[in-house]
Image (cartoon, helix red, strand yellow):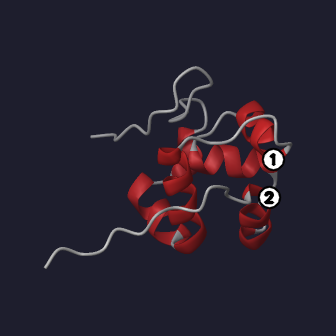
């Protein structure tokens, strides 16, 4: 029997996720490879992250240590963001 797929909540409280992880906007952006301006837009409600990014943020919230391990030293990824302003695709690095 296939597993039941859980529907993601329509909104993600990015500010609460950052607070839980005790990270500033710039630290969060650098660690998880988001453009800082995009984070600010999401937190201010100017835009909402697309479903793929909400899934990524949910994983960050629940399993941040696993995400850090998977990214292999996420802080070094800061200059090459995985999420761009024009395209919100999650990249998988080889």
Q: Quadrant of the C terminus?
A: top left
| Residue drawn at 73 percent across, 56 percent down | 14
| Residue drawn at 74 percent across, 72 percent down | 20
Where 75 falls versus 34 (above or below)? Answer: below
Instruction: Tell me which corner region of the image, top left, top right, bottom left or bottom right, holds residue 83.
Output: top right
| Residue drawn at 63 percent across, 24 percent down | 85
- Circles 1 and 2, Cβ within 8 Å, touching? The answer is yes
Image coordinates for residue 30, horizontal then vertical, percent:
65, 44
Instruction: Tell me which corner region of the image, top left, top right, bottom left or bottom right, holds residue 49.
Output: top right
Left or right of residue 46, residue 93 in this image: left
In space, the residues marked 1 and 2 are separated at their CA atoms by: 6 Å
Image coordinates for residue 82, horizontal then vertical, percent:
50, 36
Mark 2 secondary-structure assignment? helix
For label 1, the residue is 43
Label 2 crowd (10 A; few <14 / some 14-19 / many >=20): some
| Residue furthest left in the image | 1
Viewer-closest of 38 and 22: 38
Where 53 falls versus 4 (above or below)? Answer: above
Number of residue marks: 2
């Amino acid at each position: 029997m296939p597993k039941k797929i859980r529907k993601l909540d329509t909104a993600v409280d990015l500010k609460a996720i950052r607070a839980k992880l005790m990270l500033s906007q710039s630290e969060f952006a650098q660690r998880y490879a988001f453009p800082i301006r995009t984070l600010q837009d999401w937190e201010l409600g100017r835009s909402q992250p697309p479903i793929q990014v909400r899934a990524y943020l949910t994983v960050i919230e629940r399993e941040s240590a696993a995400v850090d391990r998977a990214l292999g030293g996420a802080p070094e990824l800061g200059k090459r963001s995985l999420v761009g302003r024009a395209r919100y695709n999650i990249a998988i690095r080889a």
